[in-house]
Amino acid sequence: MTEFVNPQTKYYNAFNLIGGIGPIGFKKLLTYFNSLEDAWSAEFNEFKQAGLTEFVIEQIRKKRHKINPDWEMEKLDKQGINLITVQDKDYPRLLKEIYNPPAALYIRGHFQSADKCFGIVGTRKLSAYGNQITPLITADLAKSGLTIVSGLAKGIDTIAHETALKTNNRTIAVLGSGIDRTSIYPFENQGLAEKISQNGAVISEFPVGTQPLAQNFPQRN
């Protein structure tokens, strides 16, 4: 059973399901309100005082009454998805140091404090050279103890993940969509994502059900 230790976690997920809030919006909520639980039950004029945009406030107005935070967490639990918030000790230390770190990370699989990560990304349209050299480089790096990180895309990303798995080493896929099975992109890598979650992690800052929209990928990167 998935464990959600932070009692505020369900409100991170609930606000994420609203859409459009983003890291800056979460910062404003956490600064203005005592807790996200207080924010979830706040009046709409309080969101304006907190500094949220009119667009986001309107999204809250439209969607909040349709979202039950407890039920939504049960959905994550049934799918084996964990959620780490920026307030949790397990949140990646270096990620927290960027300018606007994601407020929450959805995870299938496990982070390990010992992970020393190396990113391998590249073109979706493989050249003969890329197809030949990527497995060789990846295998050497993985065997040296590095955790291979990529984006689950076709081409170089797929080869990097598959090579790490073939050498029985950890690999992490960072997605620009939800990590639930119906949102995995590309569709043909659903099976690969499942294998990665068993020997590493599949992660995303986007909530369950988020489709692989073009604007998500620069944010993911």
Image: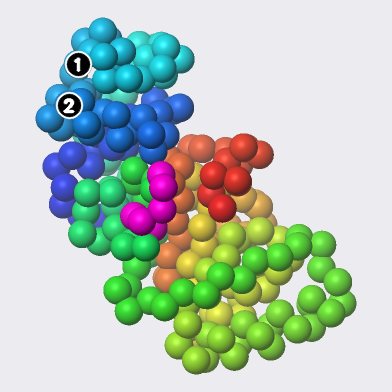
Instruction: Point out the stretch of residues depicted in magenta.
Output: 95-100
Q: In this view, does 156 lie to the left or right of 96?
A: right
Q: In this view, does 107 lie to the left or right of 137?
A: left
Q: What number is the disc on residue 173?
A: none
Residue 151 drawn above or below residue 49: below
Q: What number is the disc on residue 42?
A: 1
Quarter of the image where the N terminus is located: bottom left
Q: Distance between the residues labelled 1 and 2?
A: 9 Å
Q: Would residue 96 be counted in the magenta stretch?
A: yes
Residue drawn at (28%, 48%), measured in percent from left and top?
85
What is the x, y in percent for residue 83?
31, 50
The disc labelled 2 sits on which kind of residue?
Phe
Q: Can residue 98 be seen in this view?
A: yes
- Return the residue found at the far top: 45
Disc 2 packing (10 Å; few <14; some 14–19; many ≥20):
some
Provide the residue designation for mark 2: 33
Residue drawn at (44%, 56%), measured in percent from left and top?
203
Residue drawn at (44%, 28%), measured in percent from left and top?
19
Q: Write down the quadrant of residue 109 in the picture.
A: bottom left
Tag 1–tag 2 contact (CB < 8 Å) = yes
Q: Kindly report which numbered mark, 1 or 2, lies closer to the viewer in this rendering.
A: 2
Q: Can residue 71 be seen in this view?
A: no
